[in-house]
Image (cartoon, rainbow, N blue to C red):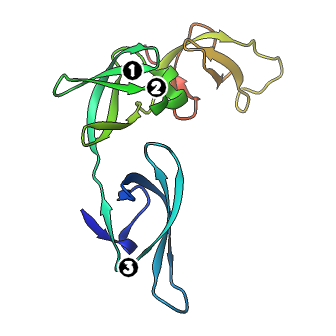
């Protein structure tokens, strides 16, 4: 779908120079001389390289719609992760690099969102929160106030998080994989 250069917004995916880019910043510029333009910062979806580009209002930019589908995590084989499409039951294999450090939070049977373009997976989004078990937690230091202090703990996947003092080893907690932050104690 073609859009005007001044209609490009943050979060849009555009095809430019035969590559797919996600728009990370935009700024409308109206210089004293000459026509207005949109200063756009983009990041290549596949390689992660950044590009600054100016799009004039009369310029046409190809906006790309990504397919989003739900998939279930099946298994990992080295750096390759295999998911099953929830509708077609077709298996999708992606490299663990696509998820980054959050790959540690993947669990058997976890439902994720996979964005793809022309059947090529581009990104995998984990659920907003995940339930994990604490395997190791530091002892509470006497005199710490419960309201503002957190102590380090280690989850079953080896990731370190900060938890309130009343959380002990063996406790199941809800964690945000986005920033490894404690949300609450899991309801059993």
Q: Residue at x 51, y 45 (%)?
A: 48
| Relative to 161, residue 115 above or below | below
| Relative to 141, residue 31 above or below | below
**Circle 3: is it few (<14), some (14-19), or many (20+) Cα within 10 Å?**
some
Q: Is residue 128 left or right of residue 121?
A: right
Q: Quadrant of residue 63?
A: bottom left
Q: Total label count? A: 3
The disc, 3 or 1, on the residue closer to the chain's N-terminal end is 3
| C-alpha distance separating marks 3 and 1 | 42 Å
Q: Residue at x 36, y 58 (%)?
A: 14
Q: Is residue 154 left or right of residue 115?
A: right
Q: Residue at x 83, y 22 (%)?
A: 143
Which element carries disc 2, helix, strand or loop? helix
Horizontal and vertical percent position of residue 133:
53, 12
Q: Nearer the viewer, residue 39 or 187?
A: 39
Which numbered disc covers residue 7? none
Q: Which residue is denoted by mark 1 in the rendering?
A: 81
* Res 176 seen here: no
Q: Nearer the viewer, residue 17 or 29?
A: 17
Q: Which residue is denoted by mark 2 in the rendering?
A: 96
| C-alpha distance separating marks 2 and 1 | 6 Å
Find the residue positioned furthest to the right.
Answer: 143
Horizontal and vertical percent position of residue 146:
71, 26
The disc, 2 or 1, on the residue closer to the chain's N-terminal end is 1
Q: Residue at x 49, y 24 (%)?
A: 103
Marks 2,1: beta carbons within 8 A:
yes
Which element carries disc 1, helix, strand or loop? strand
Q: Which residue is denoted by mark 3 in the rendering?
A: 57
- The image quadrant where one finds the C terminus is top left
- The image quadrant where one finds the N terminus is bottom left
Which element carries disc 3, helix, strand or loop? loop
Q: Quadrant of residue 9?
A: bottom left
């Amino acid at each position: 779908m073609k859009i005007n250069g001044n209609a490009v917004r943050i979060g849009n995916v555009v095809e430019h120079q035969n590559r797919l880019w996600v728009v990370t910043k935009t700024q409308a510029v109206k210089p004293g001389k000459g026509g207005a333009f949109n200063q756009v910062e983009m990041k290549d979806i596949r390689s992660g390289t950044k590009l600054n580009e100016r799009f004039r209002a009369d310029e046409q930019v190809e906006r790309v719609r990504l397919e989003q589908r739900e998939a279930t995590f099946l298994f990992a084989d080295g750096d390759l992760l295999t998911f099953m499409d929830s509708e077609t039951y077709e298996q999708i294999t992606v490299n663990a690099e696509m998820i980054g450090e959050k790959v540690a939070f993947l669990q058997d049977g976890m439902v994720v969102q996979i964005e793809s373009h022309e059947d090529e997976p581009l990104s995998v989004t984990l659920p907003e929160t995940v339930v994990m078990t604490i395997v190791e937690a530091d002892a509470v230091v006497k005199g710490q106030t419960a309201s503002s202090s957190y102590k380090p703990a280690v989850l079953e996947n080896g990731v370190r998080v900060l938890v309130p003092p009343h959380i002990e080893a063996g406790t199941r907690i809800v964690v945000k994989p986005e920033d490894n932050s404690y949300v609450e104690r899991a309801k059993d």
